[in-house]
Amino acid sequence: MHTFADLARTLNRSAVYLRGLQTRFVLPVLEGAAYPAAYLAFLRTVIFLRTFGVTEDALLRLWNLETKLLTLLHVDSTGSPTWFLDACGQKTHRKRRLLLTNHDLGVAIPARMLQLGLNFGDALPELFAGKEMGEDALRVLEGYLTALATIRRDVGDELPHVLDALSFARQLVPQTKPRRSSASW
């Protein structure tokens, strides 16, 4: 478990920047050393993607689609305030995981299929089915896949520039060895 100061130090970002991410992504603000490693892994992923030039708007759009999809699939049954982050940092079955929440869908993405009808929660049923209310998990998945394809393309386009920048940085600061990241990709 980490404190907020630990997160800022590990990510090399100011507390103001991280608070802004918490606000915009509507992440829970925890007290003391209550931030799990998964929380840190999520923030690290966002920072990595921003480094590759992915806009925060694109990340927020993807985030909203992922959390909506997980809600429609009733993944939020643990009662954890960070239930949508709890899979962050997992390294198994990478091709089956959503990009930001890192939740394992059980099928390779972009398979365009889900095992619908699963309900992991004990909540009372809604008056109308989600589909009748306009909430269709397959429609949300389709939107997610479109947003993900855009982000993947943007990262692919930026990768050669980041590698060139890394080479330049090594020339600029030759005595510094690059730190190995413990990120979960």
Image: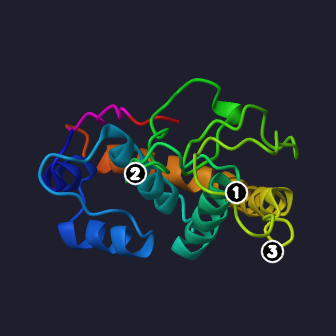
Residue 72 numbered mark, or none: 1
Work out whether residue 77 or residue 6 is closer to the camera in this orientation and state it: 77
Question: Residues under labels 3 and 1: Cα distance?
Answer: 12 Å
Label 3 Cα neighbours within 10 Å, binned few <14 / some 14-19 / many ≥20: few
25 up-or-down from 43: above or below? below
Residue pointed to by mark 2: 82
Question: Residues under labels 1 and 2: Cα distance?
Answer: 17 Å
52 up-or-down from 112: above or below? below
Look at the numbered disc 3 and give the secondary structure of its residue: loop
Residue occupying image coordinates x 22% and y 51%: 7
Residue segment shown in magenta: 176-182
* Residue 51 position within the rendered picture, expressed as x and y whole percent measured from the top left: 46, 59
Q: Which amino acid does label 1 sit on?
A: Leu
Look at the numbered disc 1 and give the secondary structure of its residue: helix
Q: What residue type is labelled 3?
A: Met
> Is residue 134 located in the magenta-colored stretch of the structure?
no
Task: Please identify the quarter of the rendering in which residue 119 is found.
Answer: top right
Look at the numbered disc 2 and give the secondary structure of its residue: loop
103 up-or-down from 60: above or below? above
The numbered mark, 3 or 1, whose residue comes first in the sequence reads 1
Q: Which amino acid does label 2 sit on?
A: Thr
Task: Please identify the quarter of the rendering in which residue 106 is found.
Answer: top right
Residue pointed to by mark 3: 133
The numbered mark, 1 or 2, whose residue comes first in the sequence reads 1
For residue 88, side relative to residue 32 (left or right): right
The numbered mark, 2 or 3, whose residue comes first in the sequence reads 2
